[in-house]
Amino acid sequence: MHLPNTSDLYRPNGGQRIGLFGGSFNPAHAGHLHVAQTALTRLQLDWVWWIVARGNPLKSSHGDFAARLASARAVARSPRMKVLDIEARLGLTYTADVLTAINARHRSDRFVWIMGSDNLGNFHHWRNWQEIGQTLPIAIIARPGGRAGNSPFERRFASARRPAHASICLADAKAPAWTFLNAPLNHQSSTRLRRTAKAEKG
């Protein structure tokens, strides 16, 4: 597999803790930033990389990729956050394949997958979701409409759950390992923003 050069795929010095935050970001908003910032702080990460999905196999409409990428870059302005278009550059669609590509390039870095709890209920529909759970630690951040409960992911990896107070060490953990982090909820959503934009055009 051809990988982009270092100007295309950001590469810090080896041995750093990096959160991988994937999503459609259609559009990106303050709720996404809240998830990324919570993970950055609570997990004591060196970086959070936003991975803008080329397309979402579970959604019928993805929105324009360039516009979604631009919205993520506009929101992720922290100097410790980077927005990547690796899926589009490599022609990848599935998270498991993206993780394989990143791990091949960054063997000495330690990664954590970051996702909002609103994705917890359908995570088992992702291709090779159990492989993802076995590949790297996962941090689930509280979001409106999602909470820790009885999802297939939680049942499958119940013995791998780490208490929130131990989350600081999550990036150093051997997968499978995951934690649920409660945080003040930000109720902004991409769906609400799209509806507002549509109404304003209407």
Image (spheres, rainbow, N blue to C red):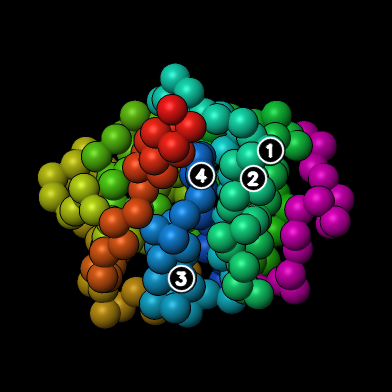
Residue 144: % across, % down: 24, 53
Quadrant where the N terminus sits is: top right
Q: Mark number for residue 66?
A: 1
Question: What amino acid does circle 3 point to?
Answer: Gln
Viewer-closest of 65 and 57: 65
For the residues marked 3 and 1, what is the alpha-carbon distance in whole angstroms? 23 Å
At mark 3, the secondary structure is helix
At mark 2, the secondary structure is helix
Question: What amino acid does circle 4 point to?
Answer: Pro
Which-is-in-front pick, marks 3 and 4? 4
- Mark 2 sits on what residue? 69
What residue appears at the point 39 percent right and 53 percent down from the top-left corner?
A: 115
**Sequence-first disc among 4 and 1:** 4
Which-is-in-front pick, marks 3 and 1? 1
- Mark 3 sits on what residue? 37
Crowd tier of the residue under label 3, counting other residues whose Cα lies within 10 Å: few below 14, some 14–19, many 20 or above: some
Instruction: Specify the segment rendered in magenta.
Output: 1-15
Q: Are marks 3 and 4 in contact (CB under 8 Å)?
A: no
Viewer-closest of 122 and 178: 122
Question: What amino acid does circle 1 point to?
Answer: Ala
For the residues marked 3 and 4, what is the alpha-carbon distance in whole angstroms? 17 Å
At mark 4, the secondary structure is loop
